[in-house]
Amino acid sequence: MLTSDTCLAEWMGREALAEAMIPVIGRLYRENNVVTTIHGRSLVNQSTTSILKAHRFARRISKEELLLEETAPLVNALAQLQLGPATVDIARLNQKFKDKRTGTSVEKFLRAELAGVAGRRGGGAGGSTDVVLYGFGRIGRLLTRLLVEQAGGGHGLRLRAVVVRKGAENDLTKRASLLRRDSVHGPFEGSIKVDHEAKTITANGVRIQVIYSDNPATVDYTAYGIRDALIVDNTGRWRDPEGLSQHLLSQGAARVLLTAPGKGGLKNIVHGINHRDVNNDDTIVTAASCTTNAITPILQAINDKYGIVHGHVETVHSFTNDQNLIDNFHQGNRRGRSAALNMVITETGAARAVAKALPELQGKLTGSAIRVPTPDVSMAILNLNLERGTTKDDVNTYLRGMALHSDLRQQIDYIDSPDVVSTDFVGSRHTGIVDGLATISNGKNLVLYVWYDNEFGYSCQVIRVMEVMAGVHRPSYPVANMVEEALSVLAATGS
């Protein structure tokens, strides 16, 4: 029987194992550009408690807590393999190792599973691409946090500058303060220093040049040592090829990504769905909208299995900076009314935009939106008519499997807690989280409730598109095998 003393001793023992893993995880990241995860949750730059929580989180998949006594040897063995750049899920590797039961050593097993990157340190996706953020608003600052978080040893996406219009004499201090503190997403994890003379903000060692300009065509990035840069326009001011191509007139700029739906035939990319459509000739690409990113992966999953005849998407969306805090003039209908006091019916192009990523749904979806008085996290209600009928249990089991084992597991998440509310999804790195308990299925009529962090989850999708455009996307291991892993989960849960 457990006592207070034995519980505390057990906890301290697990703490010691987690503490020992931290420097190994750090070296893998800095020296090999390897990100270690537990079912998609990154362990890089995490505290001892966060690593313990990630192991506890594994119960959602296997119904058993992931043991540090099993994962610690895996991590130590990974450090000996001279790995090339990769994302490695140690929870899934551990389950696969236990399922094989062949008596093979951990090292031999890992060499076989990671054959594509074992012994390839310094190769593959280890290059770097200069990144410039044009605009430093809600999305710009979250992208900064994410880029700083994954800076590692200077591989991959390398944030070099942000471009803004000067707003005040103490502009630099104010912008650094907004990066340091966020009312929704909390404080910045790390240190931030400002150099007024050089006009730079240094965040966790990443030196960011602040460039003041109101003309995207006249910035000389090469004057700051920036070349062949990926310009990420998060202002939303220009959305067509003519406007966005102004960026390419600046010296040192090579490609442009818009963090909003594009117009005029630009490719609207939803990572996980059509990111493979991006090629070297695409100098201007858009990352679509937060809502389009939230619903498209789930719609594809449903369409692939059940077929969608038609459907309606109702978005319950947090207010945005475009709305007024109190009643005042606004060009848009109803958006002039106080965002903090009202639910506001407004338009959305998200349902139509889905077809740009999923042409098979062209003309099958309608959509509308209601802005509500919350600062972040939204919900999409998918009311779908299907070709093939299903049940609530069947569709939930299918979507849970997609969230855990498919190629869309970065995009789709699943939860069946009876007590979750919108704030529980602040900071989610998935684009859409299916609320399984809210699912309604009546034969060929299906209603799904999908939560999404319209700021942070969307920013994670933008980063993924940036990696594709820059050619620095890390391969993921172990390679997804939905059928094999689903059977493993069913066996583990006794289903």
Image (cartoon, helix red, strand yellow):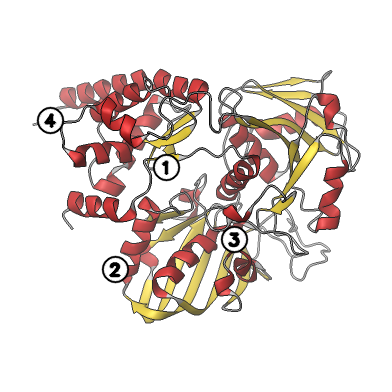
Residue picked out by circle 3: 291
What's under tag 4, amino acid-wise? Answer: Leu
Q: Quadrant of residue 8?
A: top left
Residue at x 85%, y 54% (from the top left corner): 243
Residue picked out by circle 4: 2
In three-dimensional space, the C-alpha distance between marks 4 and 3, rounded to whole angstroms, equals: 48 Å
Q: The C terminus is located in which quarter?
A: bottom left
Label 1 environment density (alpha carbons within 10 Å; few <14, some 14–19, many ≥20): some
Residue picked out by circle 2: 393
Residue picked out by circle 1: 40
Q: Mark 3 or mark 2, which is nearer the start of the sequence?
A: 3
In three-dimensional space, the C-alpha distance between marks 1 and 4, rounded to whole angstroms, equals: 32 Å
Q: Nearer the viewer, mark 4 or mark 3?
A: 3
Residue at x 61%, y 22% (from the top left corner): 204
Q: Secondary structure at mark 1?
A: loop
What's under tag 3, amino acid-wise? Answer: Thr
Residue 460 locus on image (x, y percent):
57, 45
Residue at x 25%, y 27% (from the top left corner): 106
Residue 49 locus on image (x, y percent):
37, 28
Q: Mark 2 or mark 1, which is nearer the start of the sequence?
A: 1
Q: Mark 3 or mark 4, which is nearer the start of the sequence?
A: 4
Q: Secondary structure at mark 2?
A: helix
In three-dimensional space, the C-alpha distance between marks 2 and 4, rounded to whole angstroms, equals: 37 Å
Residue 401 placement, left or right of 277: left
Residue 268 placement, left or right of 493: right
Q: Secondary structure at mark 4?
A: loop
